[in-house]
Image: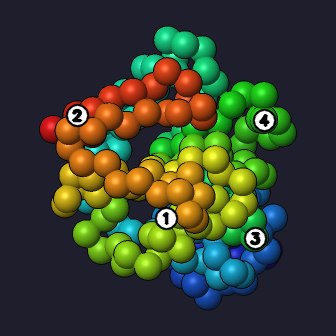
């Protein structure tokens, strides 16, 4: 990708879908509102009020716990290399011990915890595909929050999946030690 093409994308002159780029180029030049999947730039789901509201709740509880316990870093819509893709979870947790490199680019590794908040425009199979992509690349835990059903689906592997209802407690398990909150708190 040329600097001219990148400039034209950021200025809205050229559509990102019209440009071909490598994964490395995407990680270096992160294009807002897009993820990189199998050589293509894929638009992210448009932000909605409910998705934003739930994301903020997750960030509030998770970041407070991480900060108080000096457990590393929480990131919002940061770009992570996940296998041959560049994905942007709504919220992510990364141990500082795994962080290195240029802070002005995307992460060259997947997060330990990826959190996705389902949008009204999301397609279920795409959410599951993205979740399994995280797990197959080394993400240890994925939470998928669904504001419509007010549930959290916890993925530890393709065969270890739990659906948590409003009265259940969501925990960070061994990925975010000591973290716990009631599922209902995330949707209030």
- Give x and y (percent) for residue 166: 20, 43
Query: Which residue corresponds to mark 1?
Result: 33
Residue sitting at x 57%, y 65%: 158
Residue 147 to residue 60: above or below = below
Query: Which residue corresponds to mark 3?
Result: 84
The numbered mark at residue 132 is none
Q: Nearer the viewer, mark 1 or mark 2?
A: 2
Q: CA distance from mark 2 to mark 3?
A: 35 Å
Q: Earlier in the sequence, mark 1 or mark 4?
A: 1
Q: Quadrant of the N terminus?
A: bottom right
Q: Nearer the viewer, mark 2 or mark 3?
A: 2
The answer to whether residue 1 is left or right of residue 132 is right
Q: CA distance from mark 3 to mark 4?
A: 19 Å
Residue sitting at x 69%, y 31%: 95
Identify the secondary structure beneath mark 4. Answer: helix
| Dot 2 crowding, Cα within 10 Å, few <14, some 14–19, many 20+ | some
Query: Which residue corresponds to mark 4?
Result: 98
- Give x and y (percent) for residue 78: 58, 48
């Amino acid at each position: 990708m040329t600097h001219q093409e990148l400039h034209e994308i950021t200025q809205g002159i050229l559509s990102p879908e019209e440009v071909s780029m490598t994964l490395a180029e995407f990680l270096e030049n992160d294009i807002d509102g897009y993820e990189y999947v199998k050589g293509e730039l894929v638009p992210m789901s448009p932000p909605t009020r409910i998705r934003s509201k739930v994301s903020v709740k997750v960030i509030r509880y998770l970041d407070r716990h991480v900060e108080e316990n000096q457990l590393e870093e929480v990131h919002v819509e940061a770009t992570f290399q996940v296998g041959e893709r560049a994905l942007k979870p709504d919220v992510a947790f990364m141990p500082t011990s795994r962080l290195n490199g240029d802070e002005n680019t995307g992460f060259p590794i997947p997060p330990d915890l990826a959190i996705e908040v389902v949008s009204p425009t999301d397609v279920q199979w795409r959410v599951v595909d993205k979740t399994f992509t995280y797990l197959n690349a080394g993400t240890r835990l994925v939470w998928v929050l669904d504001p419509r059903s007010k549930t959290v689906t916890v993925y530890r592997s393709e065969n270890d999946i739990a659906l948590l209802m409003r009265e259940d407690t969501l925990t960070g398990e061994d990925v975010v030690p000591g973290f716990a909150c009631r599922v209902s708190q995330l949707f209030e």
